[in-house]
Amino acid sequence: MNATTYSKKDFQTDQEVRWCPGCGDYAILSAVQSVFPDLGIPKEKFVVVSGIGCSSRFPYYMNVYGFHTIHGRAPAVATGLKLARPDLDVWVATGDGDGLSIGGNHTIHMLRRNVGLKVLLFNNRIYGLTKGQYSPTSEFGKKAKSTPYGSVDRPFFPLSLALGAEATFVARSVDVFQPHLKAVLKKAAAHKGTAFLEILQNCNIFNDGAWETLTERDVKDDHTITVEHGQPLIFGKTKDKGIRMNGLNLEVVPLGNGVSEKDLIVHDERHPNPAYAFLLSRMDSTPGFPTPLGVLRAVDAPLFETGVNEQVQQIIAKRGKGDLGKLLNAGDTWEVK
């Protein structure tokens, strides 16, 4: 048990934070630095791994061990680290470009393996570091430097992708919703397995207002729904709307006129079948539906690193530790002159 009491300041570095003024990354950094002291983990047990992009500067600003790796490969490096040192608390900071474009394959396999990593995917729907090209999550028709006439790509929905890869913990929050973001970060930290957290984040330089329908005070209550385990799916400024099943589909219904909370879906983040959580992850792609925030799925499954290390120990018990020199000189060898 960690006997040291930490504060947010203990996780701050002396490095100049070099994000654009007003960037949503500042809010995410602040939330993580505020949550880490409450996790009861020695500071030297934390590691932050990143790839390439604005989000990937994260390790420089966290006063813990860290790796700034190469484009899209943070999940692979983090997986190797967790296999070698399963006692470490390994976090991955990535973006919608880094994690879903060049790194998409690594992300998928990290999720399906259920490696004990905590993944923060910053989603600003744009390539910010390279100055404003459309990304895998940019909306259809997005006009950007690389798509001056509008993107014809269909966007990825990160939570749907994660659920399709059988992720055991899938959640979403927003950079400026600090109490909510901190609460979800703590839940992700407590999960045994891959915890995938999409954080909707504003890039005020190259994609300002990407999520304004979710964050503006006068409209956010009608455009978002906070899902909580065991609670009915209710939203709206006056909590007058809900979501129920209609056959195989979800349906938004006004409360009253014979429709009550008893008719609505009660959120079950622990449902073993990911189909329900997948339906939730697609809501914001349908007009009239709110964007779900919170934990969509949190289930238990065997840990990849546990299985690998148990297998290694079983083989060592049967065959001994082995000799690297003998291995390198085994079989056919060649002498190059």
Image (tube, helix red, strand yellow):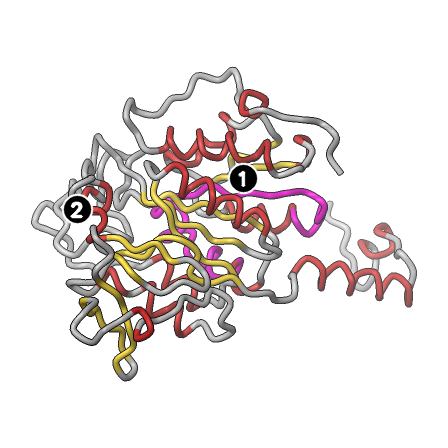
Which is in the foreground here, disc 2 or disc 1? 2
In-image side of 325 versus 305 (left or right): right
The residue at 12%/54% (across/down) is 141
Could you say whether the residue bearing mark 1 is in a helix, strand or loop? strand
The region drawn magenta spans 82-110
**Quarter assignment of residue 305:** bottom right
Which residue is outermost to the bottom? 247
| x and y percentages locating residue 171 in the rendered image | 43, 54
Indicate the quadrant where residue 140 lies: bottom left
Figure check: 54 above or below 19: below
Residue 327, above or below 68: below
Query: In this rendering, would 76 be left or right of 231?
Result: right
Q: How far apart are marks 2 and 1 (CA)?
A: 36 Å
Q: Name which residue lies at 67% across and 26% down.
A: 5
Which amino acid, mark 1? Val
Q: Is residue 154 visible?
A: no
Q: Name the residue under label 1.
A: 49
Packing grade of label 1 (10 A; few <14, some 14-19, many >=20) is: many
| Amino acid carrying mark 2 in the image | Val
Direction from residue 102 to residue 286 in the image, left or right: left
* Picture quadrant of residue 154: bottom left
Q: Residue 219 carries which label?
A: 2
Quarter occupied by the N terminus: top right
Camera-side residue: 259 or 147?
259
* Image position, residue 72 (x, y; %): 44, 47
Categorize mark 2 by other alpha carbons within 10 Å: few (<14), some (14-19), many (20+).
some
Mark 2 or mark 1: whose residue is earlier in sequence: 1
